[in-house]
């Protein structure tokens, strides 16, 4: 009986993800290295088709390449993070850095991604680990509270963990819920792509409506249908799309996918969107934009970083006539440079990553 009790207790405490770690091979494709090489591991990178998350992964790699040239960059997908983390940790040394993919997935809205973040934080104990700029959302219900308790326990157990919030709402929540961790505030790393955008005089022909198709949308199906219908009637050459594609996007294809999307934004006269990265892509390409709020606070928080760019307008209303009128008015606003100082941004983020 005592043996059965102990087995049940161990199984209860170990998740399926932990079994990945403890039974994984120590040697794998990520463990072969020169002992003198310093490595930045970028973990839980996406291979799914959310191009906002793909833009974050690309910008993270470019930032490290520009600011830590003495480091080798090793990119690890979500799947490979689970499969190979044990070997990666065991082959690492004290000079290596571990970065966790940023985005809007800290909390219980996307439990699988949060599980992958916990997995890394739990098992990377004696190395520097940085969660890149992130939005945190825990729902105010039993599931959300239970998830928060689990994350708080794991996060607080790692003294080497640094958390970066990408807007003030998340910063305040992180400071309250994770008092044992160092917390910083910086804009979404996707803004770093502005360092690669050329100000080409592109003829703007399209009018884009870019709306979410999933659970973070603030619009019902009926509202979305009416809005698209009216937008297309108002702009006969309208282009309807989302920043999510229904195909696998590997690290090899990431740059092509992201810059193809950015070029679409560069060709737009105006964009109407409820996508946070739709807002960011308009900001860095100088594209007039009307952005609607989402169910969480990440659009409101991100808009605070760019509100000095008058060609980007935030609308909290869902009134179709008012939204279409705003699409007309915003096209008359003059272009202005990104209000985020990217040199200062790079300096600050580099300090956060390197600080001991």
Image: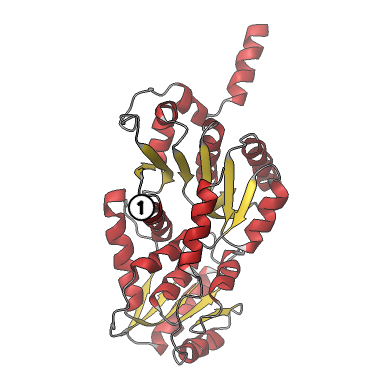
Residue at the image point whose x is 48% and y is 84% from the top: 311
Q: Position of residue 335 (x, y in %)?
A: 43, 85
Q: Nearer the viewer, residue 263 or 157?
A: 157
Quadrant where the N terminus is found in the figure: top right
Q: Nearer the viewer, residue 241 or 83?
A: 83
Residue at the image point whose x is 27% and y is 60% from the top: 256
Tag count in the figure? 1
Q: Position of residue 209 (x, y in %)?
A: 42, 76
What colouring method underlies this structural image? secondary structure
Q: Is residue 109 visible?
A: no
Figure check: 36 above or below 188? above
Q: Position of residue 233 (x, y in %)?
A: 40, 87
Quadrant where the C terminus is found in the figure: top right
Q: Is residue 286 visible?
A: yes
Q: Nearer the viewer, residue 336 or 214?
A: 336
Q: Relative to residue 171, is residue 92 drawn left or right?
A: left
Residue at the image point whose x is 55% and y is 31% from the top: 125
**Label 1 neighbour load within 10 Å: few <14, some 14-19, many 20+:** some
Q: Secondary structure at mark 1?
A: helix
Q: Position of residue 347 (x, y in %)?
A: 49, 59
Q: Relative to residue 21, is residue 73 drawn left or right?
A: left
Residue at the image point whose x is 44% and y is 89% from the top: 331
Figure check: 249 above or below 298? above
The residue identified by callout 1 is 65
Give the quarter of the image for residue 203.
Answer: bottom left
Q: Nearer the viewer, residue 24 or 223?
A: 24
């Amino acid at each position: 009986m005592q043996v059965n009790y102990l087995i049940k207790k161990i199984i209860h405490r170990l998740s399926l993800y932990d079994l990945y770690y403890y039974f994984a091979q120590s040697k794998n494709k990520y463990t072969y290295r020169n002992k003198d090489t310093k490595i930045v591991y970028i973990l839980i990178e996406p291979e799914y088709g959310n191009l906002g998350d793909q833009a974050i992964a690309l910008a993270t790699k470019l930032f490290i390449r520009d600011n830590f040239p003495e480091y080798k960059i090793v990119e690890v997908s979500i799947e490979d993070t689970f499969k190979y983390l044990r070997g990666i940790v065991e082959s690492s040394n004290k000079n290596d850095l571990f970065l966790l993919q940023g985005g809007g997935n800290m909390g219980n809205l996307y439990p699988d991604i949060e599980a992958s973040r916990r997995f890394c934080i739990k098992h990377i104990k004696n190395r520097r680990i940085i969660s890149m700029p992130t939005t945190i959302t825990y729902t105010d219900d039993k599931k959300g509270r239970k998830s928060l308790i689990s994350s708080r326990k794991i996060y607080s157990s790692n003294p080497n963990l640094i958390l970066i919030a990408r807007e003030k709402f998340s910063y305040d929540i992180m400071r309250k819920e994770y008092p044992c961790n160092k917390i910083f505030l910086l804009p979404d790393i996707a803004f770093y792509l502005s360092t690669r955008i050329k100000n080409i005089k592109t003829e703007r022909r399209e009018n884009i409506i870019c709306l979410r198709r999933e659970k973070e949308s603030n619009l019902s199906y009926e509202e979305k249908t009416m809005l698209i219908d009216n937008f297309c009637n108002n702009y006969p050459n309208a282009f309807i799309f989302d920043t999510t594609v229904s195909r696998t996007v590997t690290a090899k294809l990431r740059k092509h996918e992201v810059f193809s999307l950015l070029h679409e934004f560069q060709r737009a006269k105006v964009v109407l969107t409820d996508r946070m990265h739709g807002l960011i892509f308009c900001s860095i390409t100088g594209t007039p934009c009307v952005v609607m709020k989402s169910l969480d606070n990440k659009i409101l928080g991100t808009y605070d970083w760019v509100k000095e760019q008058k060609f980007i307008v935030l609308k909290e209303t869902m009134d179709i006539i008012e939204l279409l009128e705003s699409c007309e008015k915003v096209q008359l606003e003059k272009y202005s440079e990104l209000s985020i100082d990217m040199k200062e941004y790079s300096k600050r983020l580099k300090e956060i990553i390197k600080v001991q």
